[in-house]
Amino acid sequence: MEHAPVGVVIATRDRSAQLAVTLTHLLALPEHPEIVVADNASTDDTRALLACQFPQIRVLALPFNRGAVARTHGVRALSTPYVAFSDDDSWWAPGALAEAARLFGRHPRLGLLAARTLVGPGQEDDPLNKVLADSPLGPAADLPGTQVLGFLACASVTRRTAYLDAGGFHPLIFFGAEETLLAYDLAARGWGVTHCPEVIAHHHPAPTARTGRPAVQRRNEILTAWLRRPLPHALARTRGLAADARRDPHARHALRETLTRLPGALRARRALPPHLERAARLLDADTGPGRTGGTP
């Protein structure tokens, strides 16, 4: 069977039941994508399930939890020119990957596209769809859709060479609101990042969020500021978190985690080029800090 030019990478950990549902949907796609599962050292029956029920799926059995960097292992394992990301609770609509491949083929500067995300059995629009569609960055003559500096990882497709050129997801961020930093790094390297609602992904998240996620997202938003934004901006965001920490336990946890990782962020700091910083400020003014990438 000939595979599509778009491969699929799934990073997972300890969610075998959800993963089985996702793989069933992906294997039914008419595009027949090559699929790589990057298992972040699961302690449940994930690897046994894959070996028994999905022997045709390529598995990267990582020795420890690499967070979002597991996706980079998956990208490197594929040879397809384009790579779609799914989480263990998301999959692509029939025809979506073929449409993504057409868009990439027609637009050589396109580095990553953010799809339209439909949530749950009711297929409701994720609120991020409107945020991305209303991006004040507008269109570009050589790109499809609307320019953005954010996306939902489980509803994105990237050009493999662009992803590797930008360095992929940053290890310091680990997981949670990891998308904005990659969007910055792609754009800084000259790659286009756009929202293309004609490409559709389905997301069926569990009813309850993972423990500690609000704190992790807040931490990572501020670490992203220290990594790429002007120092006064990063300092102001950190002061705001410190003020919130006086009354909010999530903020206190986020502040501790931020300060622990701050030396690493300063060592890896690389400020955005001026034109990109202007775009980031425009998005800050339009949607508020922390709304340019990932889930709002």
Image: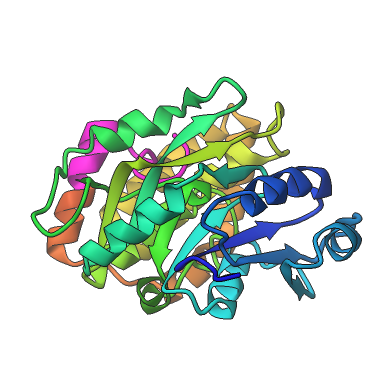
Q: Nearer the viewer, residue 184 or 57?
A: 57
Q: Is residue 270 above or below residue 155?
A: below
Q: Residue at x 22, y 38 (%)?
A: 135
Residue 159 falls in which quadrant of the image?
bottom left
**Magenta segment boundaries in residue numbering:** 281-296
Q: Is residue 192 above or below residue 131?
A: below
Q: How many marks?
A: 0
Q: Nearer the viewer, residue 14 or 159?
A: 159
- Magenta stretch encompasses residue 49: no
- Residue 204 in percent (x, y) is at 63, 34
Q: Residue at x 70, y 32 (%)?
A: 206
Q: Residue at x 65, y 59 (%)?
A: 11
User: What residue occupies the far left of the structure in this picture?
Assistant: 141
Q: Nearer the viewer, residue 177 or 152?
A: 152
- Residue 127 in percent (x, y) is at 42, 27
Q: Quadrant of the N terminus?
A: bottom right
Residue 91 falls in which quadrant of the image?
top right
